[in-house]
Amino acid sequence: MTRPRTVVIVGGGISGLATAFSLQEKATKAGLSIRCTLLESDTSWGGKIVTHRVGEMVTEAGPDSFLSQKQAGLDLCVKLGLADQLINTNETSKKACVLYKGQLHDLPEGLLSFVPKQLGSFLRSGLLTWTGLARMGLEIAVPPGPATGDESLAGFLRRRFGAQAFERVLEPLMAGIYAGDAEQMSLRAAFPRFFELEQRHGSIVRGMMAAKKAAPSVSTDQPKRTMFVSLKNGLGDLVTALTRRLTQQGVELRMGARVDALRVRSHKLGRWMYDLILQDGSALSADGVVLATPAYVSADLLRPLTPIAGGLLDMISYASTATIAMAFPRTLTSAIEGFGFIVPRTEQRHLIAATWTSLKWPYRAPADHLLVRCYVGGVGRENILQLDDDALTVKARDELAALCGIRVEPSYAEVNRWWKAMPQYTLGHLDRLAQLEAAISRYPGLVLTGAGYRGVGIPDCIRDGAVAAERVVQNLLGDRGTG
């Protein structure tokens, strides 16, 4: 009788959890018997997905939502029975603002879709001069860049929309997603859709218009989703549902289990067994291993097997950030509308963004309170993280007072620090990934997944986890006849 195949997944963030979930699905469908163990060095599951519930308030230490346009996140929620817990952003006529010369200006409607019919909102915003508007409008006449090689996000956006639109609006919108520096970011790795639209349509605007025209009509029996969605009681419920389901499926979940070393041994020609040495001195053997850890952690584990892979993983840098959540008595000024604001680098502020959490989402705070979340840190702005929590909170409060007129004391405040938590897809990232795949190709059954490679959002991590699971299953199926 063929023995069950063993798989160990290292890393219990959303990537590792999603990989384990998909692995169970795919193995069952393939008729493959597996025994899966999920290891996490920390004392909680979910990685950066951390929800705090304080009285009637719900705060998110890490991500507060995910893109509904990327289906993987919605699909997983449905499979886990969380569909009825999905919530949209609140309805509002004003979405967000951008800081320019110390003043908040409405972010032009339709900006993310680059649809030119929104010219009126650009004119009213006062963000761009007539020259800047004209240059942005000429995007449809800018020839596409080369189909090969890499280009920085900054270079691409300046080339297509002009320096003024880039510095005042596009840089904080796009680079802010990664807490990164647009001058260093790889367009093709961080925003592949922009590259594809330019190559296919010759213009981002034309490409977006074509995509909008070709988009299938939304089924009337499907709930309408806003661009970003969350869960009623916080994203922590996604982690809870995943761990519960995995436990029911027989996956062994082990917290506080740090892997110190990874060894390989050949048990048949061209086939490997993997030995994972844990910090407590124990060891696990597996037919397949998925490293769902940050690239710098995976680098330490892989360096003894392949120094080339270790070196390539070390080249994936990470930025450190912090979020500061504060609750204030509900006193709204004219600046506190919509969902929040973003801050361009050129403004040289401590804040990189702020969200009016209780205005953006339902079920986040009592009606008589305003819940705010501020973001600091990121590439080139990490010095502020050396301050202690109290000093960091004061900095955020001072900026809110200056920019938005919030001068009352918060009734609640919390600081959440994320050291080396946001991977940076710098120029050459995709080439390095190709070299990385080649370097580990001699070890079938060893797979890397996580935010450090092909997308930092929750749906990206879920999708990449499914790809990792498929690779493990295919390798085990190829080996099944030799067991």
Image: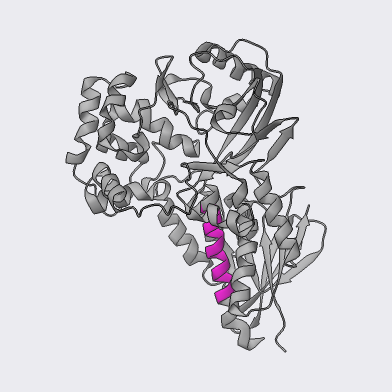
Is residue 30 one of those drawn in magenta?
no
Task: Confirm whether residue 415 shows in the render.
Answer: yes
Q: Nearer the viewer, residue 213 or 280?
A: 213
Place residue 80 in its image quadrant.
bottom right
Picture layout, residue 81 above or below residue 323: below
Picture layout, residue 477 above or below residue 356: below
Percent position of residue 92, x then y: 47, 29
Picture layout, residue 121 above or below residue 269: above
Left or right, 163 with reference to 44: left
Q: Residue furthest front?
A: 220
Percent position of residue 28, x then y: 63, 75
Q: Nearer the viewer, residue 94 or 153?
A: 94
Place residue 479 in its image quadrant.
bottom right
The colour scheme used here is: one colour
Image quarter in which the N terminus is found: bottom right
Image quarter in which the C terminus is found: bottom right
Q: Which residues are magenta?
A: 460-474
Left or right, 275 with reference to 190: right
- What's the residue at 61%, 31% (across, down)? 322
What is the count of numbered marks? 0
Q: Residue furthest left?
A: 141
Place residue 375 in its image quadrant.
top right
Please name the predominant secondary structure of the magenta segment in the image: helix
Percent position of residue 312, x then y: 51, 54
Q: Nearer the viewer, residue 358 or 147?
A: 358
Q: Nearer the viewer, residue 339 or 45?
A: 339
